[in-house]
Image: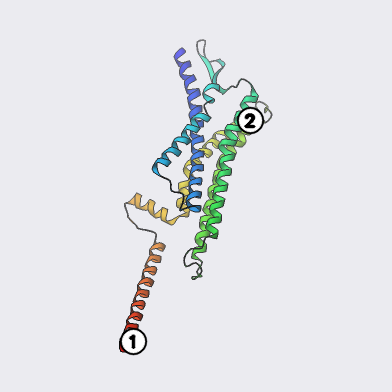
Amino acid sequence: MAFSWILGLFLCKAVAYLQGVSVCASVNTLVAISVDRFLAICYPMTWQITSRGCRVIIATIWLFSFTLTLPWTVYFRLILIGKTTENDNLYVCREIWPNEHMGVIYFIVANLVLCYLFPLLVILICYGFIWLKVWKRELPGEGMHNNGLVQRSKVKVIKMLFVVVLVFMGSWLPLYAIFTRIKIGEPYPENSLEEFIIQVSAPVAQWLGASNSCINPVLYAFFNTKLRAGFKSVLFGQKPCCSPNVRNMVKMTSRKTISARIQTRGSSKKSTTKENAI
């Protein structure tokens, strides 16, 4: 009896704590990726991350996540709700704070702001600057060749950035909306339709939020032909150097370069012949 109660208390605290740590670490990892992309694209000559710097960033993210959700190890407790038999008690795991006001403040600051609103703001700002940089950048040959290839590439990058931000916002919005209603709103009546909807939708919202951690590679593969070619090469053992469009562009560029060199050599030979004749 005592062992089962201790095991239940340990799982009550550990599961809630590790879930909070994983969510916080996942969200802040996405923030770190967006900041790294912003610095690498907008300041390519001054920003170069090293392997040591990468390890420091990862360690900082996990240390912050372990620290931020630490109160859950204290305030998640087993509550006795009844008896199954004469010797067995029925417990449920609940988040019990010394007073309700403390729990609401912790949810707003630690969960809603630091794990959703502030990361979303940072991601929006970083990808917004990336969008401006990509849209205003003029690539070599963009002004000479009016075929729209560069313009289509810019539009594709901007679409990808927009979809990544939209998916992040939409993945976590249902979960935080449900918890905001539970924490801040008025208590809903028992056995009501609202209670039923929250109980049914909460697990789905948790799954949807956690799925955001693995959806980004799928989005990148959908928008990037080079990444799709890389996946195929890994899965099927092929070794394509690049996508067919890129290979064709390389071939055309090589042919133009060779023809230009031939013309240059021919003109230099003609000028040399004229000089000798004079």
Q: Nearer the viewer, residue 251 or 276?
A: 276
Residue 182, disc: 2
Q: Nearer the viewer, residue 74 or 76?
A: 74
Task: Using a 10 Å C-alpha cutoff, classify the residue at mark 1 as few (fewer than 14 neighbours), some (14 to 19) or many (20 or more).
Answer: few
Regarding mark 1 in the picture, which secondary structure is present there? helix
Above or below — where is 163 with respect to 100? below
The residue depicted at 43 percent of the width and 46 percent of the height is 49
In this picture, residue 139 sits left or right of residue 103:
left
Query: Residue 130: x percent and y percent?
Result: 53, 53
Q: Can residue 67 be seen by looking at this rendering?
A: yes
The residue depicted at 42 percent of the width and 41 percent of the height is 53
Above or below — where is 230 with respect to 6? below
- The quarter of the rendered structure image containing the C terminus is bottom left
Above or below — where is 101 with respect to 256? above
> The residue under label 2 is which amino acid type?
Ile
Q: Nearer the viewer, residue 25 or 90?
A: 25
Regarding mark 2 in the picture, which secondary structure is present there? helix
In this picture, residue 210 sits left or right of residue 186:
left
Q: Would you identify the image quadrant in which residue 251 lies? A: bottom left
- Which of discs 2 and 1 lies nearer the camera? The answer is 1
> The residue under label 1 is which amino acid type?
Lys
The residue depicted at 58 percent of the width and 43 percent of the height is 121
The residue depicted at 53 percent of the width and 51 percent of the height is 161
Q: Can residue 162 be seen by looking at this rendering?
A: no
Query: Residue 139: x percent and y percent?
Result: 48, 63
Separation of marks 2 and 1 at Cα, in angstroms: 91 Å
Q: How is the image coloured?
A: rainbow
Sequence-wise, the earlier of marks 2 and 1 is: 2
Query: Residue 182: x percent and y percent?
Result: 63, 30
Q: Which residue corresponds to mark 1? A: 274
